[in-house]
Amino acid sequence: MATATTTVSRSKVAGGSFLIEDRALHEVFTPEDFSEQHQLIAQTAEEFAQKEIVPNIDRIEHKEFELTRELIRKASELGLSSADIPEQYGGMELDKVSSAIIAERVAKSGSFSVSWGAHVGIGTLPIVYFGTEAQKQKYLPRLATGEIIGAYALSESSSGSDALNCRTRAVLASDGKHYLLTGEKMWITNAGFADLFIVFAKIDGEKFTAFIVERNFPGFAVGAEEHKMGIRGSSTCPLILNDCQVPVENVLGEIGKGHVIAFNILNVGRFKLGAGCVGGARNSLQAAIGYAKQRKAFTKTIADFGMIREKLANIAIDVFTGEALVYRTVGMMDVALEEIDKSATDVAAQIRKGIEEYAVECSIAKVWGSEMLDRVVDDVVQIYGGYGFVEEYPAERAYRDSRVNRIFEGTNEINRLITTGFLLKRAMSGQLPLLPAIKKIMDEVLSGPSFADAPEGVLANERALVGNIKKIALFAAGAASQKYMQALADQQEIMGALADIIIEAFVSESAVLRAQKIAEARGEAAASIAIAMAQVYVADAMTKVEAAARKAIAAIAEGDMLRTQMSILRRLAKHEPVNTIALRQQIAQKVLEAGRYAI
């Protein structure tokens, strides 16, 4: 497989700048910008999934872990499992767009997708980005081929999201050649069959540090398989460390800097999880279309019923929008990473920083994608009716498998706090000029209605609404910051409401920009379905944004100030309703005629 790079000429943009800057169409990467190489990668991954994963889903679900290992090895032969590993260590060293494409296509089975993702992502990337040359030479070539399988051991029974509160301890042995690790890790994906683990422990009970631990190290043991609600075909076990002997050369990164590894690796996991959720939604839509077209009730197929068509349209809109936000995010990453000198001695650190720049966008992709997929699988169960509740039909498994995504890679609550907190931190440090933008918005909304020129052309109304969503985000964040100052971080409900507004600002704009690009390339008539999808999404988003802003403002102000701020919110959220029923009918008709997701 040939390597792939994004070919659209774009400039690097600052992470989080979507709140205060408008993007030109050529600056935004969308699936319509895939190169021939990206298309080849997508085709290769899709063919692998259809030929190797789909026929084996039942066996995967019955925990045939040797089969999972074999499938990972087969994927490695095609280059699918080594997209993020540098070429000198046997990898493909593809761009992040390619990584997202692969993650999307592999998501035919939730269980396999989780096993594969843990191996290629959080089980391998810590060594890619933080390993010494010796560690990379020793482990990466074998991880690239699937000879050995990777896993990541951060969580503990008493410290899931609060990772730095881990109890696992490491002490230097008397021989000075080993660290002895003692403790227990919980909910470790791939634990039942992985060969290599990235394990976090506190040296002398204080210095949070990462270690590369092999399965055969003395003192290492794996507990019993967990019996899970979903992703039943993946392995999830505790790790038991009893004076586990880890050579000192297997310390990963700097002693006491394990948090740098833990948090940065999760950024990659988050955008890949978002991509996988989009792939899962597309798979569910395919199943739902097929069932709706053949299932009859009251002498009609249920695909003829308005409320079933509404559900199909909603799923198609979510796939379209999810693709827009995921590929916009990874496209920005690729532009930042293209600037890096691959021959530099600190190239891995530069790559890590390039990805960390878009921590907010990665968290948004994870939160929005996982919650979107939960909506989708719920609707698909409803479309299947009673059969949706029966194991032999695909809706039931998809429903169960989806739920864990809101817990993986940092819970959605944690990621909401990251979204708001990261932006406010950047504002306070001056890295992102949010404070001047907030002041400008506060001055504008307090001085009365704005008579600025309204957008014109395709999706003019939606572009104006996106602009107002950004203003609402800045206005609400400014009001919250004025009241709570540095203590705002302790107001989790307000932080969460602000995050919901910020998320919709990025996601809505991504959908609109994608539809605009399609219209510019194909013409407005040929882009009618994409335009309709953006119109529906933004109309619904404004309702969510207004509700979140009301929640936040009611907690921030009272009396005359509350009435004033609510009046401002009403002005910013004011919009003419669009006929979303008719638009959804158009979208449903398109996907039903195509028999699949189509724009």
Image (cartoon, helix red, strand yellow):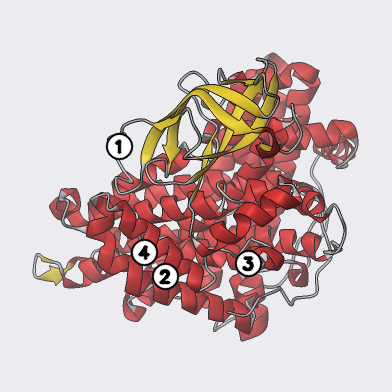
Q: Which residue is mark 2?
A: 587
Q: Which mark is residue 428?
A: none
Between residue 13 and residue 152, name the one nearer to us: 152
- What's under tag 1, amino acid-wise? Lys
- Marked residue nearer the N-terminal end (3 or 2): 3
Q: Residue 237 location, x and y as percent?
A: 38, 34
CA distance separating discs 3 and 1 = 35 Å
**Badge 3 local density, few (<14 within 10 Å), some, or many (20+)?**
some
- Seen in the picture, residue 50 relative to 145 is either above or below; the reply is below
**Badge 1 local density, few (<14 within 10 Å), some, or many (20+)?**
some
- Whether residue 224 is visible to the viewer of this picture, yes or no, is yes
Q: Which residue is mark 3?
A: 90
Q: Which residue is mark 1?
A: 228
- What's under tag 3, amino acid-wise? Gly
Between residue 376 and residue 96, name the one nearer to us: 96
- Seen in the picture, residue 546 relative to 168 is either above or below; the reply is below
- Marked residue nearer the N-terminal end (4 or 2): 4
Between residue 560 and residue 328, name the one nearer to us: 328
Q: Residue 333 location, x and y as percent?
A: 73, 58
Callout 3: helix, strand or loop? loop
Front position among marks 4 and 2: 4
- The residue positioned 65% from the left and 83% from the top of the image is 521
CA distance separating discs 1 and 2 = 36 Å
CA distance separating discs 1 and 4 = 22 Å
Discs 3, 1 touching: Cβ within 8 Å: no
- Whether residue 320 is visible to the viewer of this picture, yes or no, is no
The residue sitting at the front extreme is 175
Name which quarter of the figure residue 524 lies in: bottom right
- The residue positioned 86% from the left and 55% from the top of the image is 345
**Badge 2 local density, few (<14 within 10 Å), some, or many (20+)?**
many
Name which quarter of the figure residue 443 lies in: top right
